[in-house]
Amino acid sequence: MDQEKSPEQLKQLVEEKVTLGESLIEKLSTLKHVNGAARLEKKINQEMNFLTTNLRNSTIIENHILCSNLVHFEVVVGVLTTCRAPKHIDCSLQSESRRTPLRVDIVCDDGASWVKIIARKSKSIKAAVSGDTKYGSKNILDHADEFIEVASQNPINFRTPKIYFVSLNPLDENLVSQLEQKGITVKIFTPGMELSTESTENNLHKVLNLDITTLLAYVSSLTNGSCDWEYEEPILTEQARSEQRCPLKATLDGIFAGKRLICCKTAEKSFLDIVSLLGGPEEKYRTEELMRRIDILPDVTEIPEILRNVKIRGKIKQRSFQIFAFGIFHGALTVTSNEGFIRAVKTQEGIDVPVFVHEARALTEMKEKTDQKSSEIFIIFWRYSNFGGKVIGSHWKDWKKFQRFPNPTQQTLFHRSSPSRINLVCRQFKNESRNGSQGIRTTQQSLAPTPFEKFAAEGGHMNPSRLWKPLVFTLANDWRNEVQSWWRTLPEGDRIFIPLCAINVLVFALWRIPTLQPTMVKYFCSNPAARAICWPMFLLHL
């Protein structure tokens, strides 16, 4: 028998386990986005706390260290950091033949691959398969059958997930052969190994169902080389900026390559109606070309079984329900930007609809007639003083931050506090702007030439103390536009909450000012004997 370890040796083993746990938590910090990462981190902390508490109370024994789950967690984190597109950790899946959910250690490849971690010793696993175990205990082959059954009941994009058994110790060759015959891939874990799983690209179906949002995005002027515009609608401007960062057309073309494209009658009719009403000439031409590539099939009359319990309400509209049901009925992956429907179905019935989600793009060609290109117009304020002719000035931000000129060559830009020199830099009169800068005079009443017809601005000496008004105006105007743009993006609930919260914070702060406390007591404390009777009741109910 092995000799019992001394307290110093046990302490050293505990410190090694704690160091291992801390390194695992550090690696998990890059996987916060994976479902179950926080729960795994909590379990690792519990294991470390258990060991350190027993060590501190002198109740630690060697068995506590040998049976620690940190070894299992080491394999889980090691696989997580090397697998492709991890989605869930310790995922529970229901089965018709099980009273309790099946626990899958790791779901990766966006759900296409399931990983089970095996940390038991090879001898123990082989003995369990031979029947040398407690009555009712399941061996690795029983677990394999359960995984295969549950995987067949939970397809991903109409395909059964691939199952991987990752073992910390080498398994018997006959046992590995039996598992592979069942369709399970066995891998032996080594530190730093990379888990090679089936590529998600191979899991994309050969038939794609196109949603209305995808059809609109494909023919939009934004995705076809015209994304350098500023629109009155903030959402369109944001889509243009997103298109500049990540062009969508190339992504969709890559998905469509070699695939059969289908859509239902409902999607076709709605799409054509929208294009005829809002589309420009080029967008309509691209629509005709795209529709020649798509097979138009009748709407489904029988709802797929997976969607039969879904109720039409909220984000689940009848038209969207028809389109997604059409894709499931034909076994096709639905390409869409309708994330609201996907989340609503997931929340209502826990259903993962087979989809490929992309960003939304609207029809914008007709908007380009009234809106302005983002790089076309700039405002520049030049302020001249008598300090050796030195320019004291600043460039204003992009024209989008100020206001639009319907006709820049005729619009008057002038106010009482305007700087003494104003240039509007525009493509059509760029040269005139440069020539105009030569006509500055040093006398108090001299007039400086400008690119505007029949317009001149006063020039000459200017007291620097007068510059603070234009500066305040510039900063206030820019800040006001930023706040308005941010306010329009808030949901309705936040627009109600933020003012109420700000008022309460202001009142709370006023109570903390000693000189204002008599006023606060007078108007915020109800007292029948006081002179202000109604004000406290009114203010307290705001």
Image (cartoon, rainbow, N blue to C red):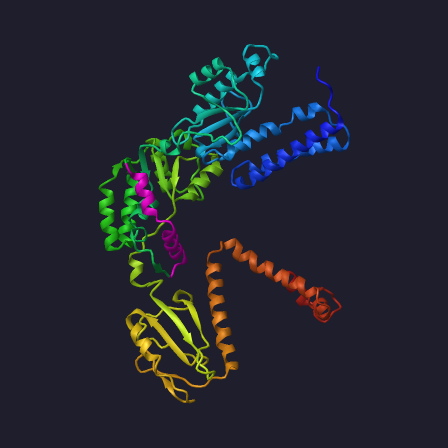
What residue is shown at x 43% (from left), y 29% (from top)?
Answer: 197
Residue 517 shows up from this direction: yes
Indicate the quadrant where residue 527 lies.
bottom right
Left or right of 526 in this view: 125: left
Residue in the foreground of this view, choosing between 325 and 231? 231
Q: Is residue 186 above or below residue 303?
A: above
Residue 410 shows up from this direction: no
Q: Residue furthest right?
A: 58
**Total label count?**
0
Task: Confirm whether the magenta stretch covers residue 252.
Answer: yes
Q: Is residue 149 above or below residue 324?
A: above
Residue in the foreground of this view, choosing between 320 and 427? 427
Task: Confirm whether the magenta stretch covers residue 182.
Answer: no
Q: Which stretch is magenta?
A: 232-257
Left or right of 235 in this view: 510: right
What residue is shown at x 40% (from left), y 55% (from top)?
Answer: 238
Task: Locate the C terminus by quadrant.
Answer: bottom right
Q: Residue furthest top?
A: 131
Q: Position of residue 301 (x, y in %)?
A: 32, 33
Task: Locate the N terminus by quadrant.
Answer: top right
Q: Position of residue 16 (x, y in %)?
A: 66, 32
Left or right of 336 in this view: 523: right
Main SS class of the magenta portion in the image: helix
Q: Position of residue 41 (x, y in %)?
A: 60, 36
What residue is shown at x 36% (from left), y 55% (from top)?
Answer: 240
Residue in the foreground of this view, choosing between 161 and 291? 161
Q: Is residue 417 above or below residue 292?
A: below
What residue is shown at x 49% (from left), y 70% (from top)?
Answer: 475
Q: Position of residue 64 (x, y in %)?
A: 69, 25
Residue in the foreground of this view, choosing between 497 and 372? 372
